[in-house]
Amino acid sequence: MFSQALAELIENRGREGAELANLIDQRLDAITDIVTDVRAKLPGILTKQRENLQARLDELQAELDPTRLEQEMVILAQKADVDEEMDRLNTHVQEVKRVLKQKARLAAGWTS
């Protein structure tokens, strides 16, 4: 009786774990899609930031040093550069997927 209850518990936990793994995998895929989307939009975002800044400066009708303006644009671009963070996020996503696959293989071997 105890061994049957234990076997059922292990089976139930296995199903629950597999379902949770699927949900996590779906979320990881969504994160990957978002990162891909952000990467594709970044050049446009930077262009829009430059246009907005230029429009504000035009409104001020101020005489500005073009070199200084370009330096400010470089600073803005560096602040908006999130490539390193997105690379790190992709690395974390891939590592979680790897661990989930490894755990699934171990669990399959344990219940077999």
Image (cartoon, grey):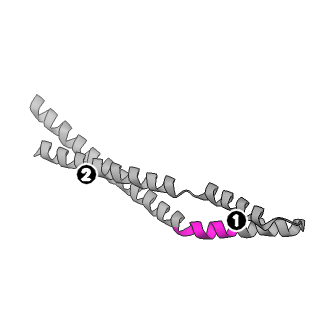
**Which label number is shown at residue 69?**
none
Magenta stretch: includes residue 111: no
The residue closer to the viewer here, 31 or 3, is 31
Question: Magenta part mainly helix, strand or loop?
Answer: helix
Residue drawn at point x = 45 percent, y = 51 percent: 88
Give the number of the mark in front: 2 or 1. Answer: 1
SS at badge 2: helix
Q: Amino acid at mark 1?
A: Gln
Q: Which residue is mark 1?
A: 49
Q: Measured along the vertical axis of the image, is residue 44 above or below residue 31?
A: below
Please state the horizontal and vertical placement of residue 25, each as a whole percent of the image.
35, 54
Please state the horizontal and vertical placement of residue 27, each as a whole percent of the image.
41, 54
SS at badge 1: helix
> Left or right of 72: which side holds 44?
left
Residue interval drawn in magenta: 40-49
Residue drawn at point x = 23 percent, y = 48 percent: 102
The residue closer to the viewer here, 37 or 17, is 37
Please state the horizontal and vertical placement of residue 83, each as a whole percent of the image.
51, 58
Crowdedness near tag 2: few (<14), some (14–19) or many (≥20) residues, C-alpha within 10 Å: some
Q: Measured along the vertical axis of the image, is residue 35 above or below residue 88?
A: below
Q: Can the viewer see residue 23 in this picture?
A: no
- Asked which quadrant contains residue 3, the reply is top left
Q: Residue furthest top?
A: 2
Q: Can the viewer see residue 44 in this picture?
A: yes
Query: Closer to the N terminus: mark 2 or mark 1?
Result: 1
* CA gap, disc 2 and disc 1: 42 Å
Please state the horizontal and vertical placement of residue 48, each as a whole percent of the image.
68, 69
Q: Which residue is mark 2?
A: 101
Q: Quadrant of the N terminus?
A: top left
> Left or right of 101: which side holds 28?
right
Crowdedness near tag 1: few (<14), some (14–19) or many (≥20) residues, C-alpha within 10 Å: some
